């Protein structure tokens, strides 16, 4: 399973990139606004830190405007992945941008039917938002399970990018289902490391080691 990080915070990205665990980055207009930085500059900087796909979302909703913005964004770096909304215009743009050889991430997916449309539009990634589905009392992980089954039935190349992840359980459930990617808020990626028995075991080992009076170097 690939791990993308869901943030536009450069300090977080630099820190987590050094872990060797990052395969890509996703951003959205809300995350860019939160960063307080210039959109294109931030994307350029992120692309220079993380070699994998870096999703940059268009702001336009009409086909022509989406294509104009995509043409600007795709020139920022080779690893820019154009993020388009799951709308008729967004999917029409997806088809053309993909055919031109640029990766496309179709975002704001909330149903298996939408995911099917994105795969048929040649998307590189489909982003189902599991947390937001859970938020309205539906089952976000059932959505992932449905998409995995449908994509496997037809051997679609589109990768399932589990988005709106709220905690480690979403990641584990998605991994069990075989989703290709999870995009994680930094806090969720850090939480994956945690287990109280690891902390307890390490404290005991360190105490016992100090008791030996030895040093390795
Ligand atoms: C994914 O690409 C989105 O940026 C993100 O996962 C949305 O998550 P949220 O529902 O926590 O805003």
Image: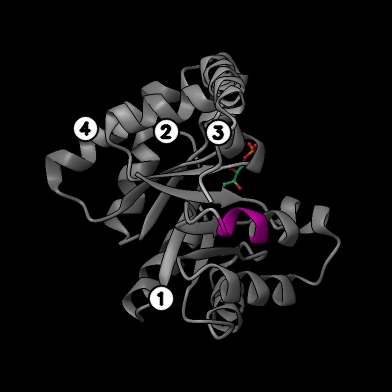
Q: Do the residues under discs 1 and 3 have CB atoms within 8 angstroms? A: no
16 in the magenta segment: yes
Instruction: Establish whether ligand 1 lies closer than 8 Å to the Cβ of label 3.
Output: yes
User: Which residue is identified by label 1?
Assistant: 102
Q: On residue 111, which mark appears?
A: 2
Relative to 148, 190 lies left or right: right
Residue 92 in the image: state x and y as whole percent.
42, 65
Mark positioned earlier in the residue sequence (4 or 2) = 2
Judge: label 1 CB < 8 Å from ligand 1. no
Residue 115 showing in the rendered view = yes
Residues drawn in magenta:
14-18
How far apart marks 4 and 2 lie (CA) works out to: 13 Å
Q: Describe the element under mark 4 as helix, strand or loop.
A: helix
Taking the spot 38% from the left edge, 24% from the top edge, the residue there is 173
Whether the residues at callouts 4 and 3 have beta carbons within 8 Å, the answer is: no
Query: On the picture, is 15 further left or further right than 114?
Result: right
Q: Is residue 64 left or right of residue 37?
A: left
Q: Name above or below for residue 33 compared with residue 95.
A: above
């Amino acid at each position: 399973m690939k791990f993308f990080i869901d943030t536009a915070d450069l300090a977080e990205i630099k820190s987590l990139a050094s872990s060797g665990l990052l395969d890509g980055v996703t951003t959205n207009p809300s995350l860019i606004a939160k960063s307080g930085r210039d959109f294109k500059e931030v994307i350029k900087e992120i692309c220079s830190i993380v070699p994998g796909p870096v999703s940059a979302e268009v702001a336009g909703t009409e086909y022509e405007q989406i294509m104009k913005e995509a043409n600007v964004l795709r020139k920022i770096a080779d690893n820019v992945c154009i993020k388009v909304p799951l709308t008729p215009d967004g999917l029409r743009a997806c088809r053309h941008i993909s055919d031109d050889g640029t990766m496309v991430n179709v975002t704001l997916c909330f149903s298996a039917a939408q995911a099917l449309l994105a795969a048929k539009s040649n998307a590189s990634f489909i982003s189902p938002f599991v947390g937001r589905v859970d938020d309205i009392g539906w089952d976000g992980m059932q959505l992932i399970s449905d998409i995995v089954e449908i994509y496997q039935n037809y051997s679609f190349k589109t990768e399932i990018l589990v988005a709106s992840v709220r905690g480690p359980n979403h990641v584990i459930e998605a991994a069990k289902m075989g989703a290709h990617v999870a995009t994680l808020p930094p806090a969720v990626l850090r939480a994956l490391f945690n287990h109280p028995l690891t902390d307890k075991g390490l404290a005991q080992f360190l105490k016992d080691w100090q008791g030996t009076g030895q040093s390795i170097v």
